[in-house]
Amino acid sequence: MSKINAVITGIEGYLPEYILDNSELSKMVDTSDEWIMTRIGIRERRILREPGKGTSDIALVAVTRLLEKTGTSPDEIDFVLCATVTPDMQFPATASIIADKAGIKNAFHFDLNAGCSGFLYALSTASQFIETGRVKKALVIGAEKMSSIVDYTDRATCPIFGDGAGVVLLEPTTENIGVIDMKMQSDGVGRVYLHMKSGGSVRPACHESIDAREHYIFQDGQHVFKWAVSKMADVSVEMMEKHGLTPETLNWLVPHQANMRIIEATAKRMGINKEQVMINIEKYGNTTAATLPLCLWEWESKLHKGDNIILASFGAGFTWGALYLKWGYDPK
Ligand code: UT7
């Protein structure tokens, strides 16, 4: 029997309409377009402003469009996996909320939290279910309403993050395309450098936690930067070497969009030029688990069947990894 691979057969994304640009941010905190562009490379980010709307609502737009675009009935979906650090609520899983809103009735669903590596981990996880034959059509989602956990009085973190969602349809194939290999790595030593202090079981929400502004992202930026810059490049180069990929045969790098300097350092270590790298950080900032599918979605019309693509990520945990993907279809 031929080996089953998991291949992406469709992709969609959605970004909320409201644009928070650097000039507006500069009125909220002591910062400037010049500082943000030089140190991070972000000009604007999208924000979901409607009250009462959450991560599932951002994801739902992308999911609905993907089902329509691929001619897939909600009944055909048998697995929904949502990578997020900003679930609608602690429980149930946002994947279940999305599935219900999208009319998906024959699937099992759960969330996966691997910080900014969420989508890479989710794609790796879902591909295992496809490869074993247990699942035929999976939706793998990366979705975030980061604005719900950003402290807009903290200039060290508020320029970085934005809201958005991307989703792929994953199906089996016996062709030599799809998810070829992945390496995921984690080190819990990183938990002190990037986390949310309150709202979990150790320190549930209380007046003191709210007064101390502990329900927002805490990041020791420099420490995270040093780890990200070396780990993301290490694992990407290792993946290239393992599969005999060269700068000439690798078509695309899809890096997590946390900082332009980290992206450039990773590309340099891999020996590839900027034209081979998907970069949209300037427009959307760091959308955490949504960065990788949003890039693939934006570049979809440029991708061809068999293209060699490396996805690379680094995030809270720490978590990091690289995934080698052979693209599944030509532009439609
Ligand atoms: O997605 C998950 C993974 N996350 C990452 O990969 C993020 C990794 N970290 C980074 O990208 C960078 O560390 C940051 C963008 C977060 C910060 O850049 P940095 O070059 O490491 O700046 P810094 O934190 O060392 O701060 C340098 C200076 C400080 O001033 P002093 O102490 O030198 O006087 C900060 O107070 O810049 C100041 N600063 C700002 N100035 C203007 C910090 N934030 C701002 C700001 N505007 N927004």
Image: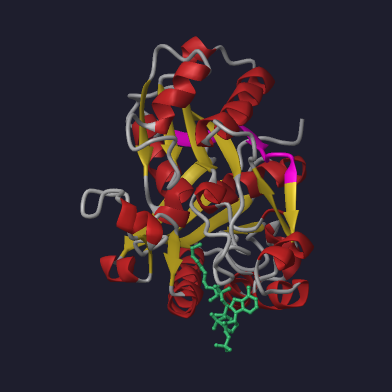
Identify which residue is drawn at 63% across, 64% down.
159
User: Could you tell me if residue 242 is visible in this image?
Assistant: no
Image spot of residue 330 (x, y percent)? 72, 36
| Residue 202, quarter of picture | bottom left
Quarter of the displayed picture in which ligand 1 can be seen: bottom right
Pick the residue in front: 155 or 239: 155
Image spot of residue 76 (x, y percent)? 48, 13
Q: Main secondary structure of the magenta part?
A: strand
Identify which residue is drawn at 38% across, 55% down.
210
With respect to residue 251, does 17 lie above or below?
A: above
- Check the image and tell me how it is coloured: secondary structure
| Residue 91, quarter of picture | top left
Q: Quadrant of the N terminus?
A: top left
Q: Which residues are magenta?
A: 5-18
| Residue 278, quarter of picture | bottom right
Horizontal relation, residue 245 to residue 217: left or right = right
Q: Quadrant of the C terminus?
A: top right
Identify which residue is drawn at 37% across, 42% down.
112
Horizontal relation, residue 272 to residue 101: left or right = right
Image spot of residue 90 (x, y percent)? 34, 38
Residue 322 covered by magenta stretch = no
With respect to residue 74, does 141 lie above or below?
A: below
Identify which residue is drawn at 60% across, 46% down.
163
With respect to residue 48, does 202 lie above or below?
A: below
User: Could you tell me if residue 177 is visible in this image?
Assistant: yes
> Tag count in the figure?
0
Pick the residue in front: 64 or 244: 64
Residue lying at the far left in this picture: please name it: 202
Image spot of residue 24 (x, y percent)? 75, 60
